[in-house]
Amino acid sequence: MGKTALCRFTQSISRNRSKNPGFGCCRSWRGSRSEVGIQKEEEESDMKRTMAAHAEAWLCLLLWGGTMVSTKILLGSVSPVLQLFLRFLIAYLTLRICYPQKLVLVDKKDELYFFICGSVGITFNLVFQNMALQYTKATNASVIIASAPMVTAVLVHLFTEEKQLHRNFVIGFILSMTGIVLVSTNGRGMSLELKGDLLVGCAALSWGIYSFTLRKIAKKNYDMLCCTRRIFFYGLLTMFPILPFVDCSIRPAGSSWIFIAVNLLYLGIFASAFCYAVWNHVSGILGVVKTNVYLYALPLVTFLFAALILKERVSAAGFCGIIFTIAGLILSERKPGKGKVE
């Protein structure tokens, strides 16, 4: 719109210049001012868009922080894999009903990217996490899964021309991981559980591959709601063959059916349909590496939920961990030589 108006304005200058040279000179000066004004408006618009994206990333973290409690409650009544399947089935149906627009692919080969995101980012990532929790502690899992931003940055660094592993990112990663260890263990230390920890490492790698592939999709300027719905479809498609080989029982075990339904709806509608759609949208604006840096704060959000809702005690080590995590997150967002968060 702004470019069209500017073209018409330039044509007007050319017509009037032939009739009145002085007038053309005056209009040219005004045209320069107009260009500066348009550029300033675009910069302000981009800044607002970026700030909104940062706020949306924090909103996702707040909602995802609550999933830990909700998932733990459901594990006593609904088997892990069935819980995942129902969660993403609800998410897919929500997006299908609320946003029925059809996704038209620019290139048929892009279908492969959606399949990778759905199978690796949804099915493998979450199945690895659930399997790992049978062999390792939740504290170990939360620390290892928080390494996903570094995995993503390494993949982008190795397979693209973008060099994301700058000094501040690496130092920020070390600070954040130190903080996450302190927050997750609350100063009690960690013990190595090889089998479970390796499975969580596979989950972190899966998320890194998901984010790297999502970056390719974001560059095609597809509608992100349609993209998220397609990714959920492939997640369900690759999850379905697993169901006959695992426990798919539902045992209320003291919980009412309404209570189970409310938790599943929360996980499906808010933690999946809404959060994944928003997260993918934010990744398209900030880039997958910068967006994934916010995952450093996920154990922090869960820790604060536990302190406020479950009344768990915050130790001095946990408080130091909060400071380390936030400092690392801020530092990772800054490029060397720049004084502001991008």
Image: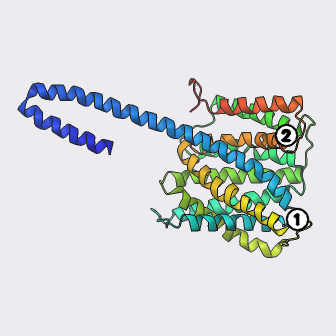
Q: Residue at x 72, y 50 (%)?
A: 64
**Image quadrant where one finds the C terminus:** top right
Residue 205 in the image, given as x and y percentages of width and height? 72, 51
Amino acid type of the residue that numbered disc 1 sits on in the rendered structure: Ser
How many callouts does the rendering have?
A: 2
Can residue 203 be seen at all in this image of the molecule?
yes
Amino acid type of the residue that numbered disc 2 sits on in the rendered structure: Ala
Q: Residues within 10 Å of mark 1 (few under 14, many from 20)?
A: few
Residue at which label 2 appears: 307
Q: Is 179 situated above or below 72?
A: above
Q: Which mark is residue 255?
A: 1
Q: Is 281 situated above or below 101?
A: above
Q: Where, by quadrant of the figure, is residue 62 drawn?
A: top right
Can residue 154 be seen at all in this image of the molecule?
no
Q: Residue at x 53, y 67 (%)?
A: 100
Residue 92 in the image, given as x and y percentages of width and height? 63, 66
Secondary element at tag 2: helix
Answer with left or right where residue 235 lies relative to residue 41.
Answer: right
